Amino acid sequence: MKVLRYPVRSLIGDYLRAGSGLGVGAVVLVSAPSDSMAVVVIFGAIAVLFAVFGLRTVQRHITEAALSKKGIACRDFRLRTIFWQDLDRLKLRFYGTRRRSSQDRSNFLELTLAGGGTSLSFESSIEGFELIVWRAAKAARENAVSLDPTSAGNLLGIGIDADEDTPPPEGLEPEDL
């Protein structure tokens, strides 16, 4: 079993953005005249939006994903597990302005897995992301899961062929997972 987490260094910027946005919204709300309903609504919404973003960042900070031969388990505010034999959906989405290096932090991928009534999502900043994608693609192939063209293309973009057995990422033996 391999346990994977989001590195703190990848979350620092999100914490700073959440704190700054929440701070600006709160300062304006506290200093705004009480009869200025438009300011209260606009900056109240901004403060709530950044507070939710901050909670999402905390969720990623505490997330642990355990990858094994049998499946993947994710613990954050709750524990969810998908067994590879139950995997029935895999989506890999690219978010960014244009495709560049897979190490480019301004772009990211998001993997969504579903099976057995459970859904899990992982952003590419989690340690071992390509390992999770590789193992999920293997399970999808074994379960004859049909992939949408976008997901299949994004898999190819990181060197994983959805239709053929692709070697695992460096440093991992296939029998490990």
Image (cartoon, rainbow, N blue to C red):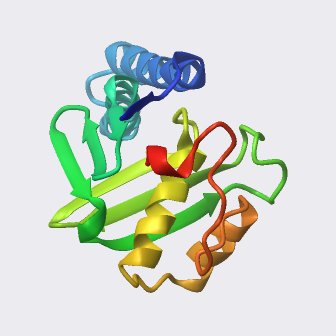
Please name the residue shown 73% across and 42% down the image: 106
For this rendering, which residue is in front, 150 or 96? Answer: 150
Please name the residue shown 62% across and 52% down the image: 168
Q: How many marks?
A: 0
Which quarter of the image is occupied by the N terminus?
Answer: top left
Residue 3 shows in this picture: yes
Q: Is residue 160 above or below residue 132?
A: below
Residue 43 shows in this picture: no
Q: Quadrant of residue 22?
A: top left
Please name the residue shown 57% across and 37% down the image: 125
User: Where residue 82 sits: x, y (%)?
Assistant: 24, 56
Q: In the visual, does 142 lie left or right of 82? A: right
Q: Is residue 14 above or below residue 171?
A: above
User: Where residue 157 sits: x, y (%)?
Assistant: 74, 64
Q: Is residue 3 above or below residue 144?
A: above
For this rendering, which residue is in front, 14 or 33? Answer: 14
For this rendering, which residue is in front, 139 or 40? Answer: 139
| Residue at the limit of the structure toward the front, as seen here | 175
Please name the residue shown 46% across and 43% down the image: 176
Q: In the visual, does 3 lie left or right of 151? A: left
User: Where residue 135 sits: x, y (%)?
Assistant: 48, 56
Q: Quadrant of residue 47?
A: top left
Q: Is residue 132 above or below residue 87?
A: above
For this rendering, which residue is in front, 29 or 77? Answer: 77
